[in-house]
């Protein structure tokens, strides 16, 4: 599954990262722009 940062459009790919996005801590931030986890949306 993939999630996209709605601020900078960076894509979190669970397969590449090796951990489900839901398992990331609540204080996870986008590595590109620093946006919080709540700014990510699931890509369909």
Image (tube, grey):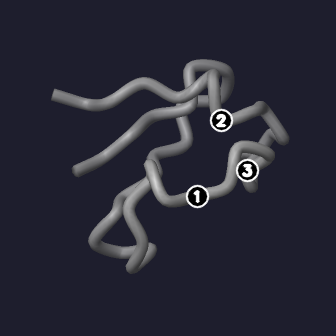
Extreme residue in the left direction: 44
> Do tag 1 and tag 3 residues touch (Cβ < 8 Å)?
yes
> Do tag 2 and tag 3 residues touch (Cβ < 8 Å)?
yes
Which residue lies at the image location 56% right of the left edge and 31% below the top edge? Answer: 5
Q: Quadrant of the C terminus?
A: top left
Q: Give the mark nearest the N terminus, 2 or 3.
A: 3
Badge 3 local density, few (<14 within 10 Å), some, or many (20+)?
A: some
Distance of label 2 from label 3 (alpha carbons):
6 Å
The residue singled out by tag 3 in the image is 28
The residue singled out by tag 2 in the image is 37
Mark 3 residue element: loop
Q: Give the mark nearest the N terminus, 1 or 2.
A: 1
* Residue 40 falls left or right of residue 3: right
Which residue lies at the image location 39% right of the left edge and 39% below the top edge? Answer: 3
Distance of label 1 from label 2 (alpha carbons):
9 Å
Mark 2 residue element: helix
Q: Which dot marks residue 24?
A: 1
* Residue 1 falls left or right of residue 27: left
Residue 43 picture quarter: top left
* Residue 40 falls left or right of residue 7: left
Badge 2 local density, few (<14 within 10 Å), some, or many (20+)?
A: some
> Do tag 1 and tag 2 residues touch (Cβ < 8 Å)?
yes
Distance of label 1 from label 3 (alpha carbons):
6 Å
Which residue lies at the image location 28% right of the left edge and 71% below the top edge? Answer: 15
């Amino acid at each position: 599954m993939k999630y996209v940062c709605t601020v900078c459009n960076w894509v979190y790919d669970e397969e590449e990262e090796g951990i489900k996005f839901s398992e990331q801590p609540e204080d996870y931030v986008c590595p590109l722009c620093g946006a919080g986890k709540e700014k990510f949306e699931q890509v369909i």
